[in-house]
Each structure stands twice: as structure tokens, then as C-alpha cells.
Amino acid sequence: MKHLKILLSTVFVVYSWSVHAQWSVIDTTDARHQKWYLEQRFSPEEWNASNFASNEEMKWFNDSRYGMFIHFGLSTYIGKDLSWGMCQTRKAPDRGNGPIADSVWVRYPEKFVFEDFDARRWVDIAKRAGMKYIVTIAKHHDGFHLWDTKYSEFKVTNTPFGRDYLKEIADACHEAGMKFGIYYSQRDWYHPDYEPVDTSLIEQVSEPPYFKSRAGVPEVKPGPKHQKYIDYQFNVVRELCTNYGKVDVFWFDASWWGGMFTADMWQSEKLTRMIRELQPGIIINNRASIPGDFDTPEQKIGMYQQRPWESCLTLCSSWSWSDTPVKTKEQIVKIITSTACGNGNALLSWGPKWGGAFDPKQVRRLEEVGDWLDQFGYTIYKTQGGPWYPENWGGSTYIGNRAYVHVTDEATDRLVLPILNNQLKSVKYLTGGRVEYDQTSDAIILDLVNADNSKESIIVELEFEHKITGMAAVSGQLSKFSDPVYGQVLLTKEDLNAEGILVVDLKKTNHVTGVGIELSKPDGTQKFSVEVSTDGKKWDRLADEIAPAGTWELTVSQFNAGIQLPGDDIRYIRIRATEGDFIKFQIKALSVYGIK
């Protein structure tokens, strides 16, 4: 748990943004507003001066809701995360070191035969899985080119395989009518000219952006060779947008991350405008430190927003094939429905083994989900998120005059939904069971007691008199933990008075994502600390706070593969009063959120 960090804030929560995702937002707030490092803020002038796809060009993406992310590269040879699980050298501003010496992993291409590769079969699997587009790795942080570039010898055509991997996937997608996207990492731990920050001017630190100026250095600039890297980057991106037919998505991967990577490091406005000129109608993500066309939460599901977004998540436990547990059908269905209910897309990552064949059990899992989409995909594809905001119980989608309520929390047996300005005509359980509902002047009440709970979720169709427009009111007082990324309530305790210390035992280790505390000390402020443990013996201190009476929310996260992920493994939570002039402190309620 050494990477675990807890963040404490008052509960001022709106649905227009989420603190656990890589969002690009227009900043119209006071400059004193706290800026979360996963959220890149632009002034209205900066936003309007950037470049974007049109609403018409975004339509296919918004309609698709579900895509395949193919992660394959040199790290697949050892069954580890691409680049992060292999490369010993990570060039600044990235920090730390990987487990494989550079002299070793750079020779992995000599072992690259790829005898079982069949791009047409890959596309066929995606279609049978219900996926509507494919994004595949062209170059990851290790700098290995999976296409026949003219600008490097470190490439796939200089291996025993000897063919242009990217071209075969592009051709197979075009033949099948599958939308085709290219992932390209601006990071490059192999290229000799890659120097986005001059290491002689910085010290590396543990918090974003993971570096700071050395004493006496007024400004951190790129290294002296980095302009040559930018020139190289323009050349290879031009290749990718010229030699592979229609490219529908360009997926960058050097997030802003609190200033860790910035647009000037890549000349992003010039670079993305070149891409749009070479590939009219293309859509580009937000990981080049300019707004882009869609946001990119990673290994998590974002909250509802109108601006397009896409959650990328792994099928197993790594970015690339590994022999690790595969998500269940129920988990993947929940991912797809939760993203659609939030008005976003799910991009599910997997990859072949080193020989080019996919793991049969992973193929079966995707096909199982494809069977579910064959039956219920009309409640996902081409829908909009809403008209009710997602909460812990699930969410809703709609198209025309029909809304689909997706209940993914099996403990939910009654829903009270704010009324729409639209006459309800009928209610039907699509997943089986007897329909029980009531309508009052301000709510639609769904009784789920007699719903069929044997399916992956409960889906209820509500037909209205007229076309649905807009969102319903927010139901009740919502906290940040209403965001599906935080999972379910694991435990709630009330009226806890303690003699200066309170220990909560969750009875087993859970993946805890947050703790909500409602203090009830009647006079003044309360000083306290929060600690966590897996065994009740070794404790990690997460926060020392001074708080007035009221509700406080603490989110738990951990650093993994270059990003901060929600949650960590915890069994015990200890809250100590740290003020010495009183004996008792009072907690009106304490709630723990996460995944069992």
C-alpha cells in the first residue's frame, strides 16, 4: 500500500465533471479554485482557438458506444504491461525504472515471429463481440514501430515476422467496414532525441507533474535535442495518416497530468491540424494537452457529461496479454451499460499472445458479451445517456420516446425516478419478471422485487408519449460517491462516539475507493487523522485534517502504470482525534465505498 494516497475535500459536487478521470474542461472559475491534476482546464479563449471535429463527424463515435483496444508490443513477450512492465529506462518526466535491462528488451524483436497472426480473424472477433471500432497500438512508450516507417530501424519489418502489422489490421478493418483507429504514444523511452524536459534543470518529485525546477532555475525547457524529436514525430505521424487508408480515430497518450506533459512539447495544435488535413473527418482524443474531441478516463468509468468521452479498461489485469484473471461477463456488461448511461463509450483493451493468437478463454468471454449485445444492444447503441443521471444503482439511456433503465446493483429493489415533462405510456421489464410501477405527480416508482435477477442486469423500458429531450432533475442530495467509479457502499455506521480513537473493521480486505465522514462536534472544529491497514498492525497514515461539523469525503487512490487509479486494498480504517483538549469526538455517520 506504499503508493496509496487519500484526498480530502468538502462535498461540493456537480455532475459536469468528475475528479477521477482525464477530462478537458473550460475553466470559467475564479483563479483560486482548486484545480485537480487529472482535469486540464482551458480558458474560453484557449478552447475556442483549438481545433475540433464537427458534431456530424462525431456521430458515428457517439452511436458506437463500444470498441476494441488492441494492446500488443514487445512487452507481450514476457506477458507484462506494455513498456511499464519492461523498460528499465523511463525518461523524464516519467519516473522509476522497469524490470528488464535495456540491453535485453531491445533484442526482443529478434524473437518476433508472429506465426499465428490473422488480422481478418481479429476483426471478425471484434464484430462478433459487438464492438463497433478498433484502435490498435502503432507505437508505445518503448519506441518500437509496428509499421514500416522510413524514420527508424527499430520497427516490425526488421523482425523475423517481416510484415507491416499495422497495414494488415487497417486493411482488414476497411474490408469489413469496421472503423479503424491508431494509438500513437508521444512518449518515447528509446529515441535518442526525446527530451521533453531538460533533466539538467529539474528534480523529480513524487507528486504530479513529477518534476520541479532546480534551485535558481526560472523555467524548465525541453532538452537541446528535443526539436529533432518533434521533427521526427511530425514525419511518422504524417506516415500514419497517409499510408494506411481511412483513419477514423487518432489516439495520443501523453496526458497533461498536472503539467507533466504540455502542448508545446509536441507542437500539438500544429500536429493535430496536420492530422485533420491529411484525414478529413478524423476524431482525436485529448491526450496531446489540447482539448481534443473526447475525454479519456482510464481503468475507470466516468460520470455523466454531454461532451463525448471514452473509458479505456483492460479485459485482464494488464495492458497487453497476460495470464491474469479475465473480467466476468457481468463486469463487462456493467462497464458497457455504465459508460452508455453516462453518455460515453467503453474501449475494452486486450491483446494476442506473442505468437499472434488470442487466448481462447478471452475470446469466449468477448463472444458471451456479444451474445448479450445481440439481445439488448438496442438499449446501448445509438442511445444518449439519461434522462436520469447515473447513481450507484445503475443508470439510463434513451432514444426517441423510449428510455431504458439499467439496474446493475442487485441490492436495489425500488427506484424513485424524477418525473419527466412527458406522459408515461407503458413500462416493460426487458430482462423478465412482473411489471410493478406507480406514478405520482413528481416521480415514477419502479418496484423491482419481482424482477428476474438471474441476468447480468435488470433492464426496464419506459415508453413516453413524446420524444425525450433533456435530463430529469437530480434525485436527492448526491455526493461524489454517486459516481459509479466508486462502486457500492461497503459499510455504513451511525452515531459513533469514540474515546479519541475509532477503528472500523470491514471483516475482510476490500478494494476501498472512498470514506465519507459526517462530523457532529457541536462547537468549533475537529482535528483528526485517518489511517488504514490490511492486517490491523501496520498502519498507513493518509490524512491529518482540521474540519468543522459537516460531511467530508475522502477518495482513495493508488499509482499504477503511469496513472492514479481509484481504490486500494484495505480492511481496517482508524480515525484518531488529534486535538489534545477534549476526550471524545463525535461521528454522526461513517460510510465506506468500494468493491468487495
Image: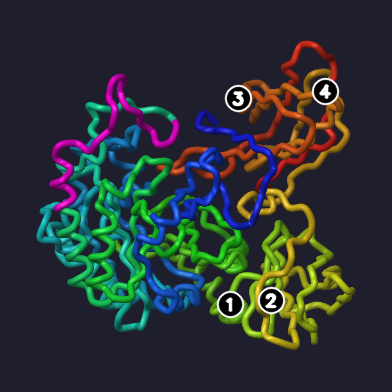
Residue 233 in sight in this render: yes
The residue depicted at 66 percent of the width and 46 percent of the height is: 594
Spatial separation of the CA atoms under disc 3 and disc 4: 21 Å
State the residue position of label 3. Answer: 540
Decide: few, some or many residues near mark 1? Use Cα within 10 Å; few <14, some 14-19, many ≥20.
Answer: many
Spatial separation of the CA atoms under disc 4 and disc 2: 46 Å
State the residue position of label 1. Answer: 383
Q: Is residue 208 magenta?
A: yes
Proximity of marks 1 and 4: CB atoms separated by less than 8 Å: no
Spatial separation of the CA atoms under disc 1 and disc 4: 49 Å
Give whichever of 294, 596 is nearer the camera.
Answer: 294
Which percent across, then down, holds residue 426?
80, 85
Mark whose residue sits in front, 4 or 2: 4
- Looking at the picture, which amino acid does disc 3 mark? Asp
Residue 438: name its quadrant.
bottom right
505 in relation to 243, above or below: above
- Looking at the picture, which amino acid does disc 4 mark? Phe
State the residue position of label 4. Answer: 585
Stretch of the chain drawn in magenta = 207-231
Mark whose residue sits in front, 2 or 3: 2
87 in relation to 330, above or below: above
Which percent across, then down, holds residue 241?
22, 69
State the residue position of label 2. Answer: 404
Decide: few, some or many residues near mark 4? Use Cα within 10 Å; few <14, some 14-19, many ≥20.
Answer: many
**Disc nearer the start of the sequence (1/2):** 1
- Looking at the picture, which amino acid does disc 1 mark? Thr
User: SS for tag 2?
Assistant: strand
